[in-house]
Amino acid sequence: MVRKAYGKSRRRKKPSQSPFLDKGLSALLLGFACLLIAWLLTSHPLLAGAARVMQTPAWFILGVGVLLLGLHYVLKDKATEEDAPHSAAPLPTSDGKASHRTRRGPVAVPDAARVQASPLSVVPVSTPDATTPKANASANTATPSPSSAPSTATWNAEVFKAIEWRRFEAVCEALFSQAGLETKSQSHGPDGGVDLWLYSQHLQGPARVVQCKHWQSRAVGVKELREFFGVMSSHQLKRGTFATTSSFTREAQTFARSNGIHLLDGKALLELIAQRTPEQQQALLAVAYEGDYMRPTCASCGIKMVERVSSQGGVRFWGCTNYPRCRTRMGQAHQARQAS
């Protein structure tokens, strides 16, 4: 009995968000129905008088319906004008772009000297309101140290160690874009096991999907490869690429060879980058060191996280600035690891 009552309560309809619209439409339907009945009764000699009497309330009900609909659209337009400044801006990401973006063809190559000499700006991060009781009850915000790009940076394994997971995905996207492929990425939220979509001008639809794992000490195993192969099969794709800053286990390598998955570990990525021109390598470095490249990005909201101190034990960790609406957190010792 308890389960049935609970199930019924969950199936109850939610209250309407536009009462004037619902009531206005109901009044219009009722008014038209009354007019239709009155029109049908006028042909009957005994009921013609009743038909004429029904016409007055019918027209009144129609007028009420039109008035309610007018109020609905007036209030709707006013609410749209008030919310326009907030809805017009795209959801921010770690690189300052909208959540979905598409690149076509090779990326523009900045001047190498300018990339090395000019300091990169730090992305401002908003912290939770200090007056919020829930935020103060769980964590205290610590002042994060801003990061800046090395003045004379070159490509090596230390670059992958220095950047966070979102910067690694951006580097992979730029690397494929330099190869002449059209790329599309999703910077945050549920990605369905796909970080990058690759398109070719010779094929319709995506040519390949890419999964990126910014792992440092842990090798990618066959479990992750099986999950990725399931994503490929669901999209009816025979080819895919799995990129990581770490390495792959033997079982993962065997599984990849048998299922059309191209593996790119940290060493292979550095070799691939070394084949690019010096200007392209500098462009990739600019992508890697863009903004506050060391501070991790919230995988759910796509914004930079803030360093906090736990109220119990004084443990430092990274937390989302949208707390308590978003409770995504990351241990500071793993700040560069992928959160998804």
Image (cartoon, grey):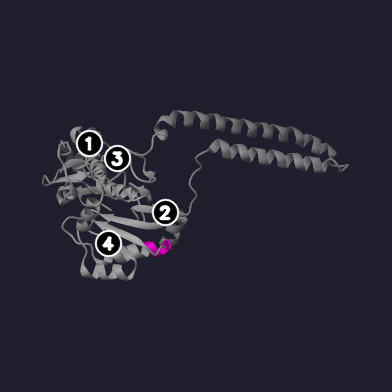
Q: Residue at x 29, y 49 (%)?
A: 175
For residue 250, what is the image quadrant? bottom left
Residue 240 visible, this angle: yes
User: Distance of mark 2 from mark 1, alpha carbons?
Assistant: 30 Å
Quadrant of the image occupied by residue 267: bottom left
Q: Residues within 10 Å of mark 2 (few under 14, many from 20)?
A: some
The answer for how far apart the CA atoms under marks 3 and 4 are is 27 Å
The quadrant where residue 233 appears: bottom left
- Kind of residue at badge 2: Ser
**Amino acid type, label 3:** Val
Name the residue carrying label 3: 109
Q: Which residue is label 1 attached to?
A: 115
Predominant SS along the magenta part: helix
Mark 1, Cα crowd under 10 Å, few <14 / some 14-19 / many 20+, is: many
Q: In the image as oriented, which residue stretches furthest toward the front?
A: 277
Q: Position of residue 216 (x, y in %)?
A: 17, 55
Q: Is residue 18 above or below residue 331?
A: above
**Residue that appears at 34% across and 48% down:** 177
